[in-house]
Image (cartoon, grey):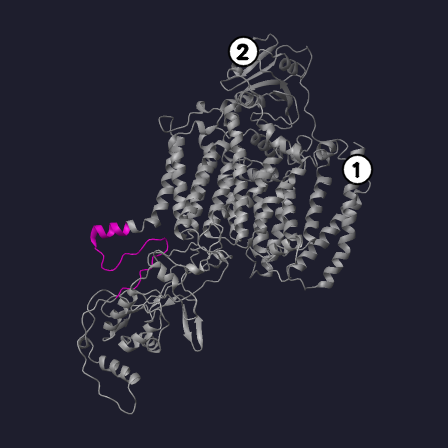
Amino acid sequence: MRQPDGDGIRTVSGGSSDVHGNKEESDVPFDPDATGIIPRLTFDEEPSGGDAPADRAGKKDADGKGSGSLPADGDAAVDGDTAVDPDVDDRAADQTATFRIPSALHIGRPPTVKEAEAADLASAGTVSMPVLTETEADAETAEDASTSAGASEAVEATRAVSRASIPLRVDASGESQAAAGPSAAAPVAGPAPTPAAAPERAPESGAASAATTAPAAAPAPAPAPAPAPAVEPVPAPVVAPKGGAAPKRAGAAGGVMGRLGALVASAPTWLPVLLVLEGLVMYVLALKVPPGPFRGVDPSKIDGLGLISALPPTAFLAILIMIVSFFVTVAQSTDRKFLLLFQIAAITFALHGAGALVASEPRFPTAYIHAGFVEFISRTGESAISIDARMGWPGFFALFAFVTKAAGIQDMTTILQWTPLLSNLLYLLPFVLILRQVVATTRARWFAALLFVLVQWIGQDYFSPQGFTFALYLAWVAILLRWFGRVEPRTKPIPAKGLRRLIGRLDAMTPGELANTGTFRADKLLMFMLLVALFLASVASHQITPFMMLGVLTAFLIVKRTSLTWALPFFLGLAVLAWISYMTVGFWSSQIDAIFGGLGNILQNLRSNTGDRIEGSDPAHAMVLQARLGILVVILSLAATGLVRRLRRGVFDRSALILLCVPVLALGLQSYGGEIGLRIYMFALPGACLLAAYAFFPNLPADSADVREETVPLRRRNVRFDPQLTKKLSVVLAACFAVLFAFAFLMARYGNEKFERVTTGEVEALHHVYANDKPSARVLYLVPKLGPEVTPTMPWGERDVEIVSFNVQALVHKDPSQIADAVKALQEQPRNSYLMVSRGQVSYLQLNEGYSADWGERFRAALDASPDLKRVYSNADAALYTWKKFVRGTETPEPRPYKTARGEPTSPWTPVGIAALGLTWATLFGYEVIRLNGPNRARRARRRLLYLAIPSFVVAFAVIIERFLYIAANN
């Protein structure tokens, strides 16, 4: 509150006090992390009798400025189609953007000298509070030119009460209370005390009043006090507690009806919790109970639409209930962080945990080969790039090999099954930290977090290096914004014309990020080391993620959104090149064309990720692929709309735009097996979701503690729509889009469930191979066309990755009776080779290549009838075939060694390059650490470090190029 302090008003931060000296808790404690803006504390000028919203909006304070949150009609400030959001309909039943100072008399002004003296006396014991006389009340009331009829009635009640004194007492806690029972902030209806009730206090009050009005030379005897009429005091405004529920008014009916009314009034507090728990339990029961009407999932009903075709209606109803619960909480305009985070986690469990709830085995066949890499490293303690190129980046596999071996875990089935859900829950933590560093309303932040869950359909969150390093990427961005963010206002004048004028105007806009303030040097050093560690972990684990991190850091430096220097990207970029050149030479030494052949083929890479995935598909499955593209188009359209709406409000969100645009540059790289588009979508999601949330909630946060209201745009225009209608409409539209995204997610995410779902029969068939794979074994898988980018649609490589080979393809045709090519492929392989026909492979051919519905049964029947093949294992989901007769004396070959006899290829300048790398990293790291203490610290030492770093960097980079050229030419 503000109190008189000599010449002016001083601000008091420790709560608020009314005019009687009673300490009153503020509606909501101030949270500086919620807005980043200092709260505005003003006196409440609303009369106790209550004004209409228009009257409240038109009031002016002592300085001539309006104290309400909504400007007058002539001063309305709303930009375009977005209206102001303050709650002007009911100031007494909702929290406002200002701290209220209620009083028994509810006089909208600072306390007078007599009132301040009474407040001081009240702290010492039972006193009588002096009140204004009729003359003083009239004088104070006349100062307010905008007093309405309701205010006049309040003044009449004040005149009646002023004839008597209200005795006060101070309880043990220090709170001043009326002697009759009610507090000063909320007086109870009843007759005013007569002079007989306090005979010794009435003359003092009268004498004090006479001393201020009568001349000192002619003192007049005090008149006999007259009995005061019974006037009911005007009650103070009722302030709603946090959560939106109005408190029970004094004098309300008690008993059962009173408690029931209080329960209904507090519904906004407990209803969201009840809804989310109800939806969560309903969803689990809908998916886990045996199949029946309106419950259970029957896998046999899964068709081209995926899992959504087999989900019961109760599952959709449960998701709808949880989303409604989220928006009920958001609509309360209170930042209930833990509840909102729990609601988003529940929705994440429903959407991303559906596969684990339904499937009997871990889904997604590629997860099994990653488990095989972990098993190999745990068993041998080595990484072998000759077995698979992915083992050239073994950081992720080595981490889990250490964890499983230390914990004694032999079976990774549970880890594989629940990794998608755990990964998405892990993604939420750094993304919420990113959202705390942007200048946005509470609704915009939490809606962006919800969107991040709803549109994450690409399925890269399974047990994989890319899913792990995406969490590292989000943590990397969060650290950059939180501990090394930089927001500086533009001081240069804007150029007169041209492109520089446009750039200058954008630079002069309000930044969409919060500045980093109050960080200790030790904290910065610790977070800088963590930043480097996260980057190096991603370098050793994944091929693309380090380039995304490096691109974001470089863009932040260009647009001046980080306090780090240009030494860091050179340090980190050299680490990426050094890892590729020195640690993965066994992979790229003979595949230079495969690695660099796709550089610059943007259109071809885009087509391989869009059009090629739709052509030739099953009609129902084509809807799934179109739904994925539809989600992409809608989220990008909303992001563009949010960016425009923020620009119209004078806010330029550079960081969000960088997070959206930097991943798109990866289209210029190779196609990455036809999946570069999926990687780009995944890394662009944080920026896209944040900007898309601004399409519904673009305004800046209010400068109040509860972060409740939304401020008006910076451009002041006339109000086009009713503020309350606009506020409610934004929430309703956001909820509709959330429901649409949730149901589209189920189709897009689980649209491939017919062949991505792994059955127990498929796993058991491969376990038969592992049990008979000594000294080696080969498994042939079915393909519609021969090519290097086709991976097996089976749970392959779970064990013995160095013994069992899955690199042989068997060509099949739409006519299931044409088995000649498949038989020939098996015939060319040595002993202990198997042709596997599985449910997942057949489903893939049916949905993506147009094979008939009974193709699998007819193909297996043709193989059974072949005189050259023998079926060695079969069940309902899979069958294994081998060659019936081998040439006498043919033995099973030994597995290919994963260690080369002559070692990895090298070049003559490699030792020089390694020495230059060490010197460059040491000098650049030292330069950045010194720079953390400030831009003016140890300039001479930093200059000397640069003199060493620049030439050593040139030598190290030249040796890396020399290795590429020399090794490629000699291998």
Image location (x, y in percent) of residue 617: 55, 24
Q: Secondary structure at mark 1?
A: helix
| Residue 572 located left or right of residue 400 | right
Image location (x, y in percent) of residue 733: 43, 43
Say which amino acid is labelled 2: Ala
Residue 199 falls within the magenta-colored stretch: no
Specify the quadrant that holds the N terminus. Answer: bottom left
**539 or 817, nearer to the observer:** 817
Please tell me which residue is depicted at 30% across the width and 88% down the height of the picture.
215
Q: Main secondary structure of the magenta part?
A: loop
Q: How many neighbours does mark 1 have within 10 angstroms: few (below 14), some (14-19), or many (20 or more)? A: some
Query: Eyeballing the image, is 622 above or below 518?
Result: above
Please tell me which residue is depicted at 25% across the width and 74% down the height of the picture.
162
Question: Mark 2 or mark 1, which has the lower sequence index?
Answer: 2
For residue 965, which numbered disc appears in the image? Answer: 1
Say which amino acid is labelled 1: Leu
Would residue 671 be seen by someone viewing this image from the given angle? no
Would residue 37 be seen by someone viewing this image from the given angle? yes
Image location (x, y in percent) of residue 233: 24, 67
Residue with the mark numbered 2: 861
Q: Quadrant of residue 487?
A: bottom right
Residue range highlighted in magenta:
234-263
Query: Eyeballing the image, is 393 above or below 567?
Result: above
Q: Secondary structure at mark 2?
A: helix
Q: Quadrant of residue 583?
A: top right
Image location (x, y in percent) of residue 941: 73, 62
